[in-house]
Image (cartoon, rainbow, N blue to C red):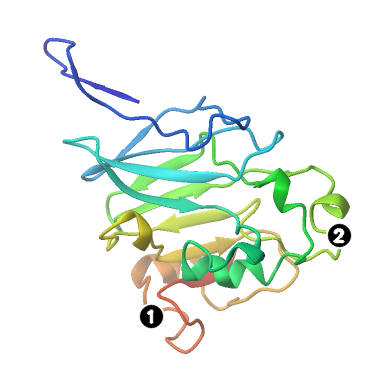
Amino acid sequence: MYALDATTGKVVWKADEVVDRNRGYSSTGAPEVAGDVVVIGNGGAEYDVRGYVTAFDLETGRLNWRFWIVPRDPKLGAQDHPDLEQAAKTWDPNSRWDVGGGGAPWDAINYDAETGLVIVGTGNGGPYDTNKRSPAGGDQLYLGSIVAQGKGCSSPAAACCAIRINIARSHPTCAACSPACMRRSATSCCGASSFPTACRVGTIT
């Protein structure tokens, strides 16, 4: 990604958002300015990638936070974020982790200035066939979902979200938490006891 001076066209900063050039990552979507960061996703879910969304500091280009869409192989140790510990429970432990899992959020990213949320539409799984991807089934979060990420991330390792809206899943984790309610109060709509992290989950009906 390149940031250019709007007057002179000179490069102010540049940043590489591809984490592994040995895999089929691509970046075909437009970046989204979200307050003091610029956010970009990636493509390649149909190949061998583990999708993520990255936020760079608008002024310096420094990595501000990164959120992985799907968990990694639990055998590798703790997940990158507590939300992914919860997500891992919705995957078969014997999933095709070597393929990556997909979920790449290639372009469906918007910023809501009123709430300060970055709204991310996540992509398809990889491999496509869920019987191969996660043989025992499961919801396989956060594929095919809307992920809303809020501020409060002090470092890449602490990348966090405020809300997760899970679309077309078999078990509504917080059906009472409507989008309108979450818009008014992202942190209290579902009740503090519902989830072990700051995230609140709802289902669009």
Identity of the amino acid at label 1?
Ser
Indicate the quadrant containing the N terminus: top left, top right, bottom left or bottom right: top left
Q: Residue visible at 11% across and 13% down?
A: 7
Q: Name the N-terminal-most of marks 1 and 2.
A: 2
Q: Is residue 138 left or right of residue 27?
A: right
Q: In the picture, which quadrant includes the C terminus?
A: bottom right
Which residue bears the numbered disc 1? 188
Dividing the picture into quadrants, the one containing residue 128 is: top right
Image coords of residue 149 (percent x, y): 40, 57
**Label 2 is placed on what type of residue?**
Pro
Identify the mark at residue 135; answer none if there is no mark: 2
Residue plotted at (50% across, 56% down): 147
x, y (%) of residue 69? 55, 52
Q: Is residue 147 above or below residue 199?
A: above
Q: Is mark 1 in CB contact (under 8 Å) with mark 2?
A: no
Residue 205 visible somewhere in the drawing: no
Q: Residue furthest left?
A: 7
Q: Does the rendering let one see residue 50?
A: yes
Residue 68 rendering spot, x and y as whole percentages? 51, 52
Which of the pair 172/5 is nearer the observer?
5
Q: Residues within 10 Å of mark 2 (few under 14, many from 20)?
A: some
Disc 1 secondary structure class? loop
Near-viewer residue (147 or 98): 98
* Alpha carbon distance from label 1 to label 2: 36 Å
Number of marks: 2
Q: Is residue 63 left or right of residue 24?
A: left
Q: Determine whether the residue tagged by mark 2 lies in a helix, strand or loop.
A: loop
Q: Position of residue 10 (x, y in %)?
A: 17, 12
Looking at this rendering, what residue extends furthest in the bottom direction?
A: 193
Residue nearest the viewer, comparing 22 with 61? 22
